[in-house]
Image (cartoon, rainbow, N blue to C red):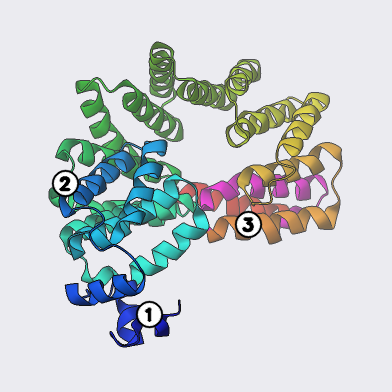
Amino acid sequence: MTQSELSEGIISVSYLSKIENGIAKAPEEVIWFLCKKLNIELHSIDHKKIENICKDWFMALFNQEQESTHTLFKEIEKNRQSIPSNSLLNLVEIHTLRYYLLHKKQNEANEQYKKLKRISKQFDDKERYYWLKFNGYYWFRLSSYNKALSYFQKAERYLHVTFYEIDEEEYSLYYMIALSASYAKNARIVYEYASKSLQYYERKVKLKQAADCHLLLGITFVRTKDFENAMESFSLAQRIADTIEDKSILATSLQNIGNLYSILNEPKKAITYFKQSYDLRDNTHSKIIPINSLMIEYYKTQEFQKANYWLKTGLNLLSEDKTPSIYKYELKVYNQLINGIVEKQFERLVLNEIIPFLDKREQHHEKVPFLEVLANYYFENRKYKLAATYYNQALQIKTNL
């Protein structure tokens, strides 16, 4: 049924469009006529019941309960016309963005984001909090970490209006601020918010969340060259992971210990931890991390046969993945470094693909190793002016950080 057919004899097409987009709230008699035309039973579920289902769904989303969020979402969609207030309907629409992100439905998330942006000016404080918070999740998923951090920090101003237990909501948001800041390489913010979250989670004996905070702090200590505290933080996360038998946290802890040993120029220890991390992982997205680390570490120690083995392992793993990523670009670069550089192709790869890709995502810090690889290549080929140009660009980024 078209909008014209549905609205005929009841309301205008433009008014119906406003109702569908959440811009206008329809009077009950209009809803009754529209439902009758659509053969929908208006009160298929009582208001209190749908209100409770919505609240259960919000909580399941907060706890990231995949199966429950899906089941409750279908129930809400089936009875959307019974949602008793415009405010609750707005909250459902806002949480729908979080639902799509949690279930990795990026196309649906993009459309929902556009829809919410059109009506966001009418949100009250509670609605605005969740809109800002889920904005953070949206941009985090798109790897725009500075933008995500900005939205999470804006959401912090509205924490007093949330309807979950305030402490849980507060420290969950603090962790996301710290996580976004970590990806954005803002050590001060990471330390401030991860420390707050860690104290809360230790007090509440929430071990998984405490381990996540230890990992964030460890990464920050590495970046500030406080290697002793970094090792302590990673080791604490590792011990917690062993205690609660969490393979994911354990793999991440071992990976970060390997990264630390690589920085400390202890390749044998680094490789041992990278292999342990690899053995614990069971999906493509996470396996590629230790694979690339092993490839790079073996290349640094000039064990090119082993480096090539891990290169091929990574290429096979991502052969059907068409999405650009930092890991795919690392594989492409090291494919040339290990198997022979094709000059123009290598330059185009770094300058025309990788650098613009990272600039678009504001991941300027990630450009450093690629700029240094390019500079090394020019230096080895006696193109000293070009080598100096890219060494200086890498140095400038490090200095700014």
| Mark 1 vs mark 2, CA separation in Å | 37 Å
Q: What residue is pinned by disc 3?
A: 355
- Considering only order in the chain, which callout, 2 or 1, is on the residue closer to the N terminus? 1
Give the residue displayed 24% in from the left and 72% down from the top. 31
Q: What residue is pinned by disc 2?
A: 163
Q: Quadrant of residue 32?
A: bottom left
Give coordinates of residue 387: x percent, y percent: 71, 52
Give coordinates of residue 233: x percent, y percent: 38, 22
Magenta-colored stretch includes residue 365: yes
* CA neighbours of label 2 inside 10 A, class few (<14), some (14 to 19), many (20+): few
The kind of residue on which mark 2 rests is: Phe
Q: Is residue 157 above or below residue 202?
A: below
Kind of element beneath mark 1:
helix
Q: Is residue 44 left or right of residue 301?
A: left
Kind of element beneath mark 3:
helix
Please report the bounds of the magenta region as a residue range: 361-386
Q: Is residue 308 left or right of residue 232?
A: right
Give the residue displayed 71% in from the left and 49% down from the top. 375
Give coordinates of residue 220: x percent, y percent: 40, 34
Kind of element beneath mark 2:
loop
The kind of residue on which mark 1 rests is: Leu
Give coordinates of residue 92: x percent, y percent: 29, 56
* CA neighbours of label 1 inside 10 A, class few (<14), some (14 to 19), many (20+): some
Task: Give 301 or 312, whichever is nearer the viewer.
Answer: 312
Which mark is drawn over residue 6? 1
Task: Give 124 or 195, whichever is nearer the viewer.
Answer: 124
Q: Quadrant of residue 203?
A: top left
Magenta-colored stretch includes residue 57: no
Q: Quadrant of residue 337?
A: top right
